[in-house]
Amino acid sequence: MKIISCIKPVPDPASRLIINEQKTWIKDQDLTFVASEADNYALEEALRLKEKHGGEVVVISMGGEEAARVLRSGLAMGADRAIHLLDPKFKGADEFAAAATLAEAIRKDGGADLVLAGVQSDDLGTGMTGTMMAEFLGCSHASVVVGVEANPEGKSLKARRELEGGINEVVELQLPAVLTIQFGINQPRYASLKGIMAAKKKELKVWSAADLGLSDDAVARNGTSPRGMVFMFILALKICRVRTRRSPCFSYSTQPAIRGFRKATASRGAKSIPCVVWPIKTRNGFSFSIILLSTST
């Protein structure tokens, strides 16, 4: 069973953060970087699945020396090899560009039975990269996972997802799959001295955008390239009192809003409008739905 675990380097929470002159981000030149906490849980889960079912664990990260540092830490924890995506073009990539780049690297490495990532990063916390990566790879996926039971022989797994109000949902997915792992699913191990020494001899590949065959548009910074631009529009729909256990339905009244958004984005040259719908039910009985519309030109 081949498992790829994604790791994002983030500033150490103990660091003193200073806003840069452009007021767009923090000064990161002198910061200490560590692996995002949720990604540590994902790596630990990958290592436990490997210990149970065999195979290999590959860690992958984008960035400069800070990414190399967290990859070496992952190798010391027990990963078998690492992939470092290193290119100045990757700096400042948004979630869309990061997911596309990671997916292309995973394909170049021969794919994987299972890809794991943290549910969200410690710095931006958008929680979108893992699910976007699943779409790029054409894999089934589950988010906010708090339990995994893999069946490599049957090419499937059962994932237990955390919902609101302490409710868990169990879903069965076909492999290959992408999971985003929730905080607290396990207790991440510490790297042993033996593991640290062994990490120095493990394979660490370094790939650039050119190695992946990616154009400048595909790795545009902050989604500013016309081809990499993602328009997102969130509609809160039909807030109503629900007296039954049925999921909320969508009334025709939402259609004019969706049609209006399609018309607006079409004027920007949009080619398609993927639509993701989240029905949400609160503990006090209210229910509403969120529609995320995204276009890529």
Image: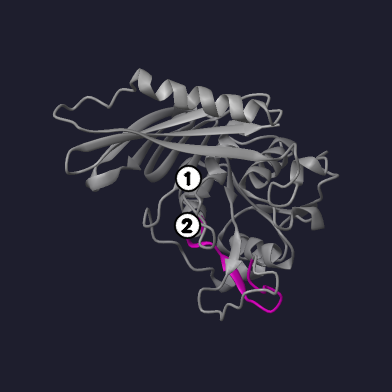
In the displayed structure image, the side of residue 208 where residue 16 appears, left or right: left
- Where is 70 relative to 245, above or below? below
- Judged from the image, the secondary structure of the residue bearing numbered disc 2 is helix
Place of residue 170 in the rendered image (x, y in percent of width and height, measured from the top left): 32, 34
Q: Nearer the viewer, residue 9 or 68?
A: 9
User: Given the current orientation, which residue lies at the most extreme right position?
Assistant: 210
Place of residue 155 in the rendered image (x, y in percent of width and height, measured from the top left): 49, 26
Q: Nearer the viewer, residue 67 or 45?
A: 67
Q: Nearer the viewer, residue 182 or 153?
A: 182
- Report the residue marked by disc 2: 38
Amino acid on which disc 1 is placed: Thr
10 Å crowding of disc 2: few (<14), some (14-19), many (20+): many
- The magenta region covers 25-39
Location of residue 105 (image quadrant): top right
- Where is 50 relative to 75, above or below? above
Label placed on residue 61: none
Label placed on residue 180: 1
Q: CA distance from mark 1 to mark 2?
A: 9 Å
Amino acid on which disc 2 is placed: Ala
10 Å crowding of disc 1: few (<14), some (14-19), many (20+): many
Q: Main secondary structure of the magenta part?
A: loop
Q: Does the magenta run of residues contain 142?
A: no
Q: Where, quadrant-wise, is the C terminus in this rendering?
A: top right
Q: Does the CB distance between marks 1 and 2 fall below 8 Å?
A: yes
In the displayed structure image, the side of residue 232 where residue 291 appears, left or right: left
Residue at 70% in and 69% down: 22
